[in-house]
Image (spheres, helix red, strand yellow):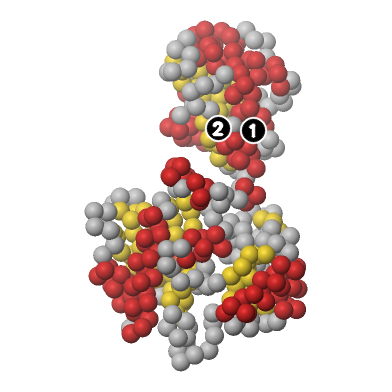
Amino acid sequence: MNLHEYQGKEMLASFGVRIQRGIVATTPAEAVAAAKKLTEETGTGWHVIKAQVHAGGRGKGGGVKLAKNLEQVEEIAGQIIGMNLVTPQTSAEGKKVHQVLIAEDVYYPGDNEPEEYYMSVLLNRGTGRNMIMYSTEGGMDIETVAEETPHLIFTEEIDPATGLLPFQARKIAFNLGLSGTAFKEMTKFVASLYKAYVSTDSSLFEINPVLKTSDDKIMAVDSKVSLDENALFRHKDLAALRDEREENPVEVEAKAVGLNYVDLDGNVGCMVNGAGLAMATMDLIKQAGGEPANFLDVGGTADAERVEIAFDLILKDPNVKAILVNIFGGIVRCDRVAQGIVDAYKNMGNIEVPIIVRLQGTNADIAKELIDNSGLDVQSAVEFQEAADKVQAVLA
């Protein structure tokens, strides 16, 4: 589950991470009021207006702008709120901006020049350990840094038995070229950041940039936080931060009825039971010359109601040209699934895309007879290859 920048910053601050302070606003009037309050609290004269959407690269799409007075705050907030923000991480349609973060200007003059760094905390799946990735090249896309200057990316792995050790935080500060007050500030920043990551059961923290201010403070100017949804039952307060407006509406609808659905860009809808079979089914579709339009796991109770909901979700995608149902009847009997498919088809009326059904397992032979004798435009298959051939035929 992704958080907005302002939500991520508030969470980081609760663990002692220094952040660029800001106030969220949903209207230009609220933006002006937020700017006035920030000026009173921080003394900042300029303000940064940041679109709050679940996507990176907001500045490239015009979603991050600097305002030098209250009139500009109101004008810029009015331009950004309600716009469809297109970034390298959104679709061509972009994402609608419902709110902006009015943030303090932290690039103020001082004894030293401000410097930007990159830092993230994530799981290294190859080693099974958490890892801090960091670089002196903050403010840039880390993918570009990795491609053009890979020697400027450092990693520090943390042993889960000991956690982050003090020498590791000092090593990170040293590799970033820091000394004196900034060095001490960075070690505190790293320790607090890692504590926040572990304590919230997150899957990713990305701070880009981490800023060393002109007076050697270290703070998070941005935040990208992804929480592990499997652990949200332990964090009811964090689960409440979900913004469903930022998520695919079909995926939200599926989640509400207990289905695992992921929208993809293909032309063949998939209905399966079990994640492993789903992956194999998507491979099958690719081999047949199609592209999966979704990942949809109906679980072990594929009755008529559940199948009808699944069909309805799949058919919301106008790009779907065929549907492949691939169910293994272990716990659930195949004949019950077949009857569910027949009943759902009849309840929904005319389904204009062809449906191929492959049922294997308990009572698979009875299930095939039910499908074949239903009189509906549904094709049955027994083997994987047979299902692939029928998908290929309907797409031709």
Quadrant of the image containing the C terminus: top right
Q: Where is residue 106 in the image (x, y as percent from the top left)?
A: 54, 79
Q: In this view, does 171 lie above or below 374?
A: below
Q: In which quarter of the image is residue 76?
A: bottom right
- The percent position of residue 213, horizontal first and vertical second, equals 47, 82
For residue 265, which quarter of the picture? top right
Identified at 59% across, 78% down, the residue is 41
Mark 1 / mark 2, whichever is N-terminal: 2
Helix, strand or loop for disc 2: loop
* Marks 1,2: beta carbons within 8 A: yes
The residue lying at 50 percent from left, 18 percent from top is 359
Q: In this view, does 127 lie to the left or right of 368?
A: left
Query: Which residue is drawn at the image coordinates 54% and 13% (left, top)?
Result: 336
For the residue pair 290 and 308, the one nearer the viewer reads as: 308
At label 1, counting other C-alpha atoms closer than 10 Å, the crowd grade (few under 14, some 14-19, many 20 or more) is many
Q: Where is residue 358 in the image (x, y as percent from the top left)?
A: 52, 20
Disc 2 marks which amino acid? Leu
The residue indicated by pointer 1 is 313
Specify whether 129 is left or right of 145.
left
From mark 1 to mark 2, how far is it between C-alphas?
10 Å
Which residue was labeled with disc 2? 259
Q: Local crowd at mark 2 within 10 Å, few (<14), some, or many (≥20)?
A: some
Residue 130 visible in the shown view: yes
Figure check: 278 above or below 174: above
Q: Which residue is drawn at 57% across and 58% down?
A: 4
Of residue 167 and residue 248, the one placed in the foreground of this image is 167
Which residue type does callout 1 highlight? Leu
In this view, the mark in front (1 or 2): 2
